Amino acid sequence: MVAVTDTPQRSLVATLWAEANWVQRIAALLALALLLAAVLAPFIAPFDSLKQSLISRLRPPLGFERYKDGFLLGTDELGRDVLSRTLYGLRLTLGLALLGALIGLVIGGTLGLLAGLRRGWAEDTIMGAVDIQIAVPFTLIALLALSIFGSSLPIMISILGIAYWEQYARIVRGEVRKITEMPYIEAARASGAGPRYIALRHVLPNIVSPLVVQFTLSLSNIVILESTLSFLGLGVQPPTATLGSMVGYGRDYMPTAPWIVIAPAVAIILLTFSVQILGDWLRDRADVRLRDR
Amino acid sequence: MTLYILRTLLKMALTLFVIITLVFFATRLSGSPLETFLGDGLTEEDRQLMIEYFGLDGSIWQQYLSYLRGVLEGNFGLSFLERRPVAEIVAERIWPSLQLLLAALAATLCVALPLGILAALYRTSWIGSAIMALAFVGYAVPNFVIATFMVLIFAFMLNWLPVVGNGTWAHFIMPTIAMSGVLIAALTRFTRNAMLDVLGQDFMRTARAKGLPETVVILKHGLRNAGVTVLSILGLQIAGLAAAGNVVVEAIFSWPGIGELLVNAAITRDYPVLQFGVITVAAAVIVINALTDIAYAYADPRIRLGKG
Amino acid sequence: MKKLLLTTAAILAASGALAQEITVGAANVSSYLDPGRDHSNVGSQFYYNAFDTLIERDHSKLEPVWEPALATAWEQVDGLTMEFKLREGVKFHNGEDMTADDVVFSLNRMYQATFAPYVVRSKDRLGNFVEAIKIDDHTVQIKVERPEPLWETLVSLQQVMIIPEEYTKALSGDPMVAEDSDFEAFSLAPVGTGPYAISEFVPGEKVVYSRFDDFWGDLAPLGEATVIRIPETASRITALKTGEADIVTNIAPDQLALIESDANLKTEGSATALFHVMIMNVNHPNLTDPKIRQAMSMSIDRDLLNEALWLGKAIVPSTHTMEEMGALHQPDLTTFEYNPEMARRLLEESSYNGEEIVFDAFPVYYTNGVLAAQAIMEMWAEVGINGKLNVTDKWTGNDPEMMARSWSNPMYFADPFGSFGVMWAPEGPSEGAGRFNTDAEYAAMWERFRFSADIEDRKAAYAELMERIKQDPPVLPLYRPFESWAMHKSVNWAPQPGHIPYVLDFRAGSIALAES
């Protein structure tokens, strides 16, 4: 969906904009704004997001008593600027979520396709792995993996990437099975089309829509998973912050200094909200095209 | 049919075996329980003593084999920390988690199904948009954000609801909402989308053309067919929830559930508890999945058991 | 008629007393309860209400004042033997009488330990104790290997609280033999002689104390006290507000103002007899030069950490010492100081070339732990140390790769031996873990500090040890954290100065509930 709002083909953007209803337009603008904020964080952040000031901890945002000049959204438990941290957190969170969801999509989609098209041991093995992944609480897998491999950004991305691959795999396989039982696929097969041709020509276009929905869902799931790990103190290494870890570490201050939590929480909500509306919109469009054909 | 059931059972056993093996080795790679249990540093001599005490002497393969032997005999060992049978410990924790899960599930079904159907039927009007916007909000707010804010408002400020444990029905309100928020959002969306898919299908047009009343068309044909997708999604979600046992919600509401137990066991490297907990949860999820598969097959006449 | 009224009044009074119940919301509840093998900060909360030692300390006083408890009198028979007269008529919670056999059994389970967790625990502090022997039904002797300067201290330890022999042995297997499984079963169904019996114990979740009416001393002021686990800080404070808890533990300094602002609530706190410390691996290839470790230590502005994170309520020590240690409290020593210029100079003189120095920290275990660690990274950067924080739940203290990490060093008993001594003895846990070295000279100083009968000599020896630590530092005590409890105003309770850290003392004189 990022690609869509960013695309240079003006006509397409114009078409999309014309089609959209007001909720979708707002979501599109919001997504664009968040994306820009994330990309431009180093330029627009008013302060160094890591710069501590122990003597001015927990200062409230603009408009409250004890406000510290310039620190619009207040300061956190180490006197760092909440606004700057939120911007950098957004940047990192968005990056982690996109990378993670993409890894999940590629792994899960490929394996799901394989399982759906190839029956037999390949399907059994893949679905067996899916069953295992579903059956073992992922928080535990993540905890064990973090203990074994240590916590670093690449490890974190890998963990977030494999967190939801099985959902893609299950959905893709389910759709593939449904589609391959349709009469026209049987016909194509009868006329000598190979599995690869069937996959690319008939199956892929049909699974785009559930994949898009799943992608948007897993984006927010990943954000939430990352913050759950932060909640347990095992997310991204401090002082680096993601939106999730800001909420996770800041939660003890909820009753006393809620602004530490509110800024990143609102950012998370806006991010997932807009991403999902856009995903849903794309899905509807894809469906319309499917039906038109 | 018998063959199908046998095959399924065999597959379940195999899955469990692989899980047991993976968890066994992963826990041992993840670190040693000794210092967690004794707090301070240990001299080498002390380490040896404690290694023997916990039964961690001998090669990892010997330990693995003796663990498997124990599993076959139904003996899953003693917790390193509590020194009592792990089955006892896990059993204590399963029920509260299950209670919360069932409450959340009931809330989800009651709210999400009607909302999803409505959203599909009134797709073009403001009702549909409003429902979906709500669903998106529900999905966008992480459960611990809902939980923390609810605690702040309804317990801390207003003093209306209790926050500790699972003593009375009032204790269920906030955790249930926190747990089901995301579920409701997801299920509403899936119900709507599945309904939309179904509404566009030929057999719906046929049904309408036959002059059946709209309600009948929707409930009989629409829901039944949409049910296939909704069921599979629901199965996934329950499985996910049952498995996760939601550590965060349990921590915030001091809920004596399995999620917290397992995370603590992972952090303290209480191998026997972690292993048995994972086996139990995995077995439960595998059974739920098998049931979902059967229900899926049953609900969708196009998918016949024999074709798997 | 008059008699009837009196009886009614008595019943009313009794039921009034019964109504004296409280609920405590604790951040953590023990997974087992055995005073012998436990010395965790979580565990030390729970034992004092239910168990007694032979000698008791007046916990309302900072300096040691010894009082009779299960022993009514004690005297040294010879240089290596102390004789104890046991109190008569003492009952265990299960109704059995306490005898000399129980005392001998309890002590020897530690002194001559065979159960691995006891062996490990007794070695670091009870190594000098040889055995306990029964003289007659009410007399017991304890024998030591070398003359012991800390008799009373080491007989009043949590680890040598008295438990029933027959009950314990009968818990599993052969009822006449003390097997390992007996001790394991005991830790799930603990029985002692204290003013409260543990009437319910759900490991990791809940401990319920009930008044023990056959207690030998002043009866417990509460009819029942329940400790439940509430792991989240915000939930603990909320539980206090909703009335689900009467007292809650582990309140961070940042939360104090919030609680004090509520007219129904108050806080009590003290600088706990425990140091949050930074340990450094003297054997790490990049840190073998003591100047680097001195710089790591001198660059940390502990007073600023105290001001910022603890509202100035923590205590920043100049050396490894505590007020509780009485004659051995030596605040005039300066072993640790903040001196960034000196740190820079030392770095320049040293072999340091900007290598990354990794600082490991537990994620949630210590209050303000991760915050302090992040601040320390900034302070290091100020003087030119390239620090990197590694938050991990893994204990890395025995990993040769470990460079520096956060840890705590509690006062297990009120003597430098009970704090510094347990961790940094020759062949002790720090040396055993491979991150600290001692030599013959250090061992000789240690001998004088540990066993000298002359207190001035002990002090001098300890000062020499501190000088060694200063020259080649393996540790920096950051501060004594300020630990707070929050409670309803109707609860009259405060941590007593004579206890080891975290003890929840609900005995007579320690807690009272106002009539509301």
Image (spheres, coloured by chain):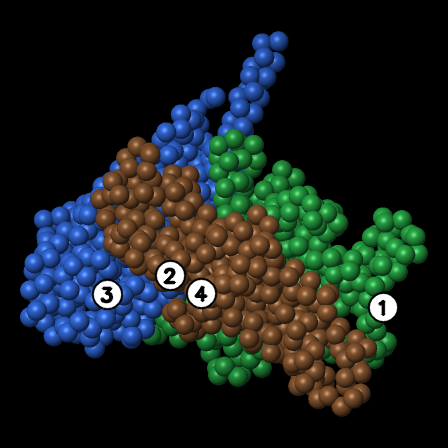
SS class of the residue under badge 1?
loop
Q: Is residue C357 left or right of residue B191?
A: left
Three-letter amino acid code of the residue under disc 1: Pro
Identify the residue under disc 3.
Answer: C387
Identify the residue under disc 2.
Answer: A39
The residues tagged by marks 2 and 1 sit, at their Cα atoms, a distance apart of 50 Å
Residue C134 lies in what quarter of the image?
bottom left
Question: What numbered label is drawn on residue B301?
Answer: 1
Please tell me if label 3 and label 2 are on a single chain: no
Please identify the quadrant where the N terminus of chain C is shown: top right
The residues tagged by marks 3 and 2 sit, at their Cα atoms, a distance apart of 28 Å
Which colour denotes chain A? brown
Residue C124 lies in what quarter of the image?
bottom left
Q: Does C221 appear above or below A86?
A: above
Instruction: Work out whether residue A234 or residue A20 is closer to the camera in this orientation and state it.
Output: A20
Three-letter amino acid code of the residue under disc 4: Leu
Which colour denotes chain C? blue
The residues tagged by marks 3 and 4 sit, at their Cα atoms, a distance apart of 25 Å
Q: How many marks?
A: 4
Mark positioned earlier in the residue sequence (2 or 4) = 2
Identify the residue under disc 4.
Answer: A96
Residue B197 image position (x, y, % from top left): 74, 61
Q: Residues within 10 Å of mark 3 (few under 14, many from 20)?
A: many
Q: Does C466 appear above or below C260?
A: below
SS class of the residue under badge 4?
helix
Residue C58 image position (x, y, % from top left): 30, 39
